[in-house]
Structure formats: structure tokens, C-alpha cells
Amino acid sequence: MSSAAISTQERPSRELSGPVLGMVLFVASEAMFFAAFFGGYYTIRANAKVWPPPGIPHLKIDIATILTVILVLSSVMVQISLRSIRAGEQRRATLFLGITIALGVTFLALQLYDYSQLGFGVKDGTFGTLFYVMTGIHMAHVFGGVVFLALVFGQMSAGLLSPANHDPLAAGAIYWDFVDVIWLLLFTTFYLLTPR
Amino acid sequence: MAVTEAPSTAVAPGPERGRLLDWLTTTDHKKIGLLYLISSFSFFVVGGIFALLMRTELARPGTQIFHPHAYNQLFTLHGTLMIFLVIFPLLAGFGNYFVPLQIGALDMAFPRINALSFWLLPVGGLTILSGLFAKGGAAAAGWTGYPPLSEQLGTGQDLWIAGLIIVGTASILGGINFIVTILRMRAPGMTMMRMPVFTWSILATSLLVILAAPVLTAGLIMLFADRRLGTVFFDPTQGGVVLLWQHVFWFFGHPEVYMLILGAWGIVTEIIAVFSGKPIFSYRGVVLSFLLITALSFSVWAHHMFATGAVELPFFSVTTELISVPTGVLFFIWLGTMWKGKLRFEPPMLFALGFIAMFLIGGINGVWAASPAMDFAIHDTYWVVAHLHYVLFGGTIFGVVAAMYYWFPKMTGRMLSRKLGIWQFWIQLIGFNLTFFPMHILGLRGMPRRIADYAPDRGWSFLNLVATVGAFIIAIAMILFFVNIFLTLRKPRTAPDDPWGANTLEWATSSPPPAHNFDRLPPIRSDRPVYDLRTAGGEGS
């Protein structure tokens, strides 16, 4: 047996490729990272006599709802892009990936605007602590996702991705969907499950 | 698809490129593995010197050398370095070198990420150590960094947080790399149930790393935010929960201790089989035990918090005792493997036997501590220090030294001196027990850990002196070890490909292996392909 063939043999296509499997494992790791923060949230909340703590203005749900729609929509877009590249439709895939990135940037801008409207800060007790640290870390992940997808966009525009080889996009889509799911959990926790 | 960027078989590093640059930029898993070992042993020397300084201070009552604040920095840095920059990276280093060889792969799945996860380590370690030059000194809240103390200390504590986040990121990247390598890069015929047990132990370790290490990162970010951004995660006066840190830290910290020992179990299981001339008593039993321990290790964290009065005692007591069952199974498998075997007492086997005996003590004194009634009495005493060191020094470090004697010929083409190895073994065994066994008694006599001084009338003085003498005897054993390595490296490469009559695939290639690992792979039809090749009488060649 020649040494060159040892690790480069073809695998059945139903198996995840190495890089995509790597991203799945990374996302599992990230899920535990966020789980620690959610654990912190519910521990602190369970220890509080009143929730939300007095003196915190009620969070308005309007902008947050728009943010949710933007991010869910962007997840749909990245999936369309992935289906397109698998079908060999390069231009369509590039277009929808572009839309995904644009929606991600919109999310970041709108959330920063939302921060400026809230009327409380990170130093305002447990609620300020949890809200800003958790949404802030999520925001950093959205930013990281935008950068990742922008790099994939560059590869795609240069024609480096194909129906047979589009691991970067597949991995990016998994990461982007994960970031979306975390936002849904944050939205549920801070907006839907906080008593008025 | 091909994911490896390993150098092709035609690689011929230009002689003009410079050896230093070659090492700095290498993506070869074998060189990276050696870099891990070099870095880890360097930090081991630093952490060891800190330990000797502490033992010198504690040899007699009274403060002779160190102000208590300096002493606090010493034990914090000793613990942090030994756990995050010595023991774990040592096992990761052997994993890097040997997992691809053991599964017949060309390299790790992501060679560049592999280089990154190594180079982050010294950066993180030096970040932590740089606290020594900060105002107020280095981190001094212990390796566990409990608030409120860790929120009150100076810049050194921030550097500790930053360093640990860097090291944690490195280990997560490394863990992902190992899992993908093991799941995707195995040679034809190398099924999961034919993988060497060491590879299994690295797979289990990697699962623990990717699921537990991010929890520590989250806790460190909370701690940093509390210190520098004005948040109140751990501040009870503002509605925060001070015990939250302990939950987060130990949710990471208990899987962590298994990250620090699983690899050593894998090494020792392999060595005992080879030097008993028998197959592993129950290969499936080992794999199942590893997997059970991996799963159970996420359910025992609060046994570190019995004394807080804020955790469910029976639940965590039972899970802790439960996890000792698969661990006990491993002991029986080791004994069963040796039973009626032709034992060869070469240095790797001696250290493996030392491992079994010492880890048995560390296991038993740990199970006692799982009982809340016992734990309340010994919590935060020297008993805990004894337990920890019987597991991590008597266990993992004995296993790592066994691995060095076992694999050194494969890594360098040179056999370490048998004579020096036997001397080292006995000196290390005696020094180790002299240092750490008395700590059990000190703990039962109520001596708290992490104190720089004690009163002369407590009955602790003599045993502390014994422990200090023992610590310097350990240092002599370690000097012998490094002298052995240094002298051997100056000798010519004479080691055969398979000096021990071993079983696993790394012994099928040359010593040291070529850049592309294998010129030819033997057929893999069991978990002992090299044994099969040897007993088939050259049928495969």
C-alpha cells in the first residue's frame, strides 16, 4: 500500500467531511460556552426576590422582534445559498450568500442602535450585567460569523467552490444557524420570559 | 475528501532554510508533539521550583523566606502551571505525536490549526507568569480563583484570566483536531474497535475538552467583566451569586481532572500489555470504562462544594462513588493483563507499576472524600493536597515518565539508559511517598492547605519537615531524568524500529518515523497489527 493513499481515500458521501465535522464539534463547544451563561442567568434569577430587579426600565420588544426576523431570514438565505451551490448554480449561491451577509450587518447595526435606546447600562445591577454580557457576546459571534461568511463569499466569487467541494460554505452555514438559535434563546429569555 | 496539508512524500526541507525556522513554522504532528513535550517540561521545571520554594518555607514553623502574599502567588502559579501547562499539554503532546501514527494517518486533520493550538500554549503560560512583574504581583487566589478574593487582587489576576482563556482556546482547537483526526483519518482496516487504547483515551479526553473547557472560558469572562466592566455576576451585595463561580469552575474542573488522567490510563494499559507479553485482559472493558467515565464526569462537580451547604449531598456523593466503578474496572483489567504474564521489568513497566500503586492510593483516598461526612472533616486540609498529588503526580506524572521511557526510542531513535531509569524510579517513588503520604496525616490533624506558616505547637512540624525532604528527593529523581534525556540525545541513533516487542502501529515504522510516517502499512486485522505481523513470521512482507 502506498503511503499517499492512507488518509486521502474517498469516504461515502453521507459522512460529514473533516472540516464540516470540525465545525459541528466547534459549535458543540460553543453551545457549552453559552450554556454556562444561561446557567448563570437562571441561577441569578432564581436567587432574586423580584425579577426583573426594580429600577430597570422594561425592555421594548419592537426592535428586538425586527432583529429576530432579520436573523431568522438570514438563516433561510444561507440555506438557499447552500442548496444553490449543491445544484451547481454559482451565481444564485453567491447572491444569496451576499444577502445573508447584508442581513448580518443590518442586525449588528440595529442592535447597536437598540443598545443606545435602552436607558440602562452594563453596570446597572444583575439585569444590566446579564443582558449586556450575554447579548454582547452573542453580538461578537454574529460579527465573527459575518467575517467568516465574507471570506467564503470571497472564495465563492473567485470560483473556488463547486458542487463537489463547498465545505467552507457548509461549515459557515452551520455556524450561522447556531448563532441564530442562540439569538432565539436570548430573545425568549430576555423578552418573552421576563415578567412585565 | 483530502483535508490534510501534510508535506507530501517528496518533501525535502532545504538545508538553507534553517532548523530554527523549520521548527517555528512546522505543521508536522511529530515535531509539534515534541514541541509540546519541550514546552511542558520547561513549565514543569518552573512549577517544580515553585513547589520546592513552598516546601522550603514550610519545612519549619515561622515565616523564613516568603511573605504570605508571595507564598499565595507561589501556590497559585504552581497549581495553574502544573495543571494547564504541564500535565494536560504533556498528554496532548504524546497524543499529537502518536495518535496519527497509531491509526496509520499521515498527519492530524488540520495541521495548521495544530500548530496554532501549540503556539498559543507558551503565549498563555507566559501571560500568566508575566503577572510576577505586575504591580501587586501575580495571581494569588489559588488555581481555582474563587471570588471574592479573585475579584480583589491586582493586575496579575487579569493576566491569569487572559492566560487561561488563551490556553483554553488552544485546548478546544486541539480537541476538535484530535476528534476529526480519529474519526476521519484512520487507515483502511483500522476500525474503531481496533484502535489502540491510548488513541481511545485521547478521543475521550478530547470530548471532555470541547464540552468542558468552554464553560471555564465563560466563567473567566464573567470574572473579568466583574473585575473590569463593573458587572455583578459574583457580587452578592448587588444580587449576584458568589457560588455561581464554584459551579461554573467545577463543572469544568471535574471533567478536567479526567482530562489529566485518561491519557495516562491509555499509556499505562498499553505498556502493561506489552511488558506482560499478553493482550489487554479486556480491550472492550477499557473502552467502555473510558466512555462511562467521560459521561459520568459531568455529573460529579459539586462534590467540590459539599462544605458550601448549597448542593444536593446524596446525589453528588452517589455519582462520585459511581464513577469509581469503571475506574476500579480498569484496575482489574491491569491486574488481569499481568496475571500469568511474562513480566519484563524495564523502566516503562516499572513506572507503569508505580502508577498503578500510587493511583490506587489516590483513588481510594478520593472515594473517602466522596462521603460528605468525611469531606466535612477534611475539606480544604492537606488531605486534599495529598489526594490531588497521588492522582496527578503518582498517577499522571508516573504515567508520563513511563511513556517517555517507552516512546523515547520511537521519537528519537535512541534508548534511554535503563540503569538511570531504574535509579530514577526508586528515588522518585521514595521521594514521592515521603512528600505526600504525611500530608494525609497532616490533613487529619487539621492542617489547612494554602498557608505559609503554622504554629510550632500543633504537631505538624515533623511531618512538614519530612515532606520537604521528600520534595528534594523528587527533585533529584527529576534531575536524573533530564540528565538521562540529555546524555541519550548525544548518542548515535541505534534503536531498532520495535525495541519492546510492542503491539500498536507506531512500531511498524522506522525510529524515528519519516516525515510521511509510513513507507508501508502492515495489514490491520486486529487491535495488535504489529504483533500479528511479528507472529505471522514475515508473511505480510
Image (cartoon, rainbow, N blue to C red):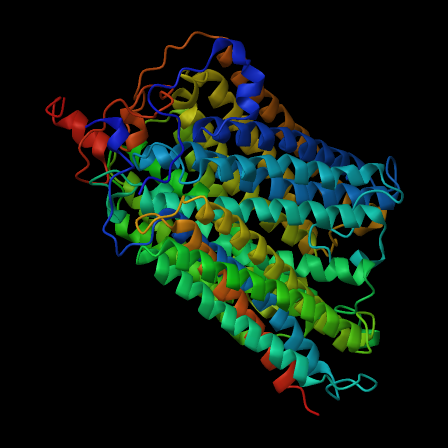
Percent from the top left, x then y, of residue B503?
26, 32
Q: Residue at x 53, y 75 (%)?
A: B314
Q: Nearer the viewer, residue A101 or B420?
A: A101
Quadrant location of residue A43? bottom right
Residue reaching furthest to the bottom:
A196
Say if residue B84 shows up in the picture: yes
Q: Residue at x 44, y 28 (%)?
A: B30
Percent from the top left, x then y, of residue B343?
30, 30
Percent from the top left, x then y, of residue B12?
40, 15
Quadrant location of residue B468? top right
Q: Nearer the viewer, residue B188 or A97?
A: A97
The answer to whether residue A138 is left or right of residue B133 is left
Q: Residue at x 40, y 52 (%)?
A: A20
Say if residue B316 shows up in the picture: no
Q: Nearer the viewer, residue A182 or B127?
A: A182
Q: Nearer the viewer, residue A181 or A63?
A: A63
Image position of B50 with respect to B391: above or below: above
Percent from the top left, x then y, of residue B483?
57, 16
For the N terminus of chain B, the quadrant is top left
Quadrant location of residue B136? top right
Residue reaching furthest to the left:
B539
Q: Residue at x 25, y 48 (%)?
A: B193
Image position of B518 with respect to A92: above or below: above
Number of disc labels: 0
For the C terminus of chain B, the quadrant is top left
The answer to whether residue A59 is left or right of residue B210 is right
